[in-house]
Image: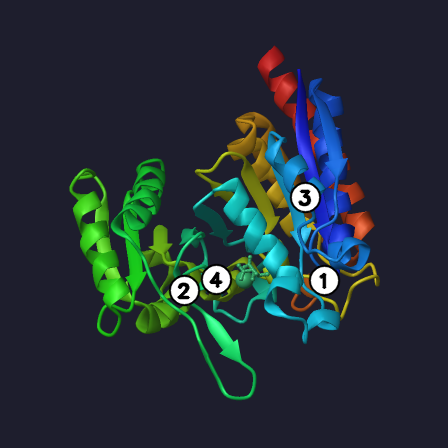
Amino acid sequence: MAYRIAVLPGDGVGPEVTQEAVRLLRAVGNLCGYEFRFTEKPIGGAAVRQSGSPLPPETREAALDADAVLLGAVGSPEFDRARAHQRPEAGLLALRQALGGYANLRPVVWHEELAGSTPLRPEAARGANVLIVRELLGGLYFSEPRGHEPGVSAYNTLRYTAPEIERVARIAFDAARGRRGRVASVDKANVLETSRLWREVVTRVARDYPDVVLEHHYVDSFAMLLLTNPLRFDVVVTENMFGDILSDEAAVLAGSLGMLASATVGGRVGLFEPVHGSAPDIAGTGTANPLGAIATAALLLRHGLELENEAADLESAIDMVLAEGWRTADLVRGAPRGARRVSTSEMGTLVERALSDVMNMRQAYHAV
Ligand code: IPM
Ligand code: MN
């Protein structure tokens, strides 16, 4: 059986890091005897340049037709003045809507090897392991009406319905059951009506999960607690915009934004994208960290194709390469003595080598 993967590299560093993620998926295929069929299509600014649209119909169809979608990043300063529907980001938002996944899972894990790369005190953050569940299809990003009269006024709408909140809350509570059994729901219920509804609905859903402990937080104080007391948190569930902001903040726990991966579930086809953006300032320099994209490939194996062993092996391979001291530019600060700096593609090659070691070890272990 062949797995069909739509690959949408996008803009900036997107193509460079996606190439490494695809390299690792191919390696998984070769090592485990799976066939992956990759179909590459343009999205974002790259697509606007080619065809005038940030989500051309053929890209949308290839994505809807795939078993999973692997995306790099979108966004380019070249389009800063473009009209809203012609911006690269509009392509990504339209794709998210078309695929229908409403729960964006963003795991954030402390890597002991990267302790020196974070500004946090290791004793306060060591062992942090948080899963941010970001609502992805509602809120300010999608609610109508919205408008902009340049230089005069502009407005957006923040709207949520109970079913939209309930479905993402269930994903968070289900995830908590397989983890440490805690959900922190983040809102701004002291000011926003949408947040009061959010709190009502999440509280109601919690009654179906008596084994899971729920706490509510206001987003402002949560933003501080997340970094001062990260060990307190397990699963975090929040609306679209808060989730966007808090996940970049949480990246501090992982050592670099370049480490974070995401999986969007609940729709027709799963969408897998690193959390980082297109980083146009370093595009083409071979310095981007591909580990977020490679960890995204692991989430694709786990949540998109239900290949849990292969996903776990790929995550172990990432840890192994870090433990051996290999670092991309973003991870060099505070690295242990003897650590060595490598390029985007060198990092991908190292993970590939580590993956075959990890898989051989697992097979040898099962053979005895
Ligand atoms: C993310 C990104 C996107 C978002 C942008 C590129 C539209 O920041 O996935 O976090 O805001 O959702
Ligand atoms: Mn973001």
Of labels 1 and 4, earlier in sequence is 4
Q: Position of residue 24 (x, y in %)?
A: 72, 36
Give ligand 2's quarter of the image.
Answer: bottom right
Please name the amino acid that badge 1 sits on: Arg
- What's the residue type where badge 2 is placed? Phe
For the residue labelled by badge 4, is the local secondary structure a helix, a strand or a loop?
helix
The Cα–Cα distance between marks 1 and 4, rounded to whole angstroms, is 35 Å
Q: In the image, is 109 to the left or to the right of 135?
A: right
Q: Which mark is residue 244?
A: 4
Return the residue nearer the eye: 345 or 363: 345
**Residue underneath mark 2:** 242
Crowding at dot 4, Cα within 10 Å, few <14 / some 14-19 / many 20+, comes out as some
Which secondary structure lies at badge 2?
Answer: helix
Q: Quadrant of residue 354?
A: top right
Marks 2/1: CA–CA distance: 38 Å
Q: Residue at x 67, y 62 (%)?
A: 331
Q: CA distance from mark 3 to mark 2?
A: 30 Å
Would you say 367 lies left or right of 134 here? right
* x and y, in percent, of residue 158 in the image: 36, 66
Asked if labels 4 and 1 touch by Cβ distance under 8 angstroms, the answer is: no
Q: Using the image, determine if residue 92 lies above or below residue 302.
A: below
Q: Is mark 3 within 8 Å of ligand 1?
A: no
Dot 1 lies on which element? loop
Q: Amino acid under label 4?
A: Asp
Numbered badge on residue 337: 1
| Residue in the picture at 43% in, 46% down | 102
The reply to whether the residue tagged 4 has its Cβ within 8 angstroms of ligand 2 is: yes
Frontmost of labels 3 and 2 is 3
Q: Is residue 174 above or below residue 239?
A: above
Residue at the bottom extreme of this rendering: 152
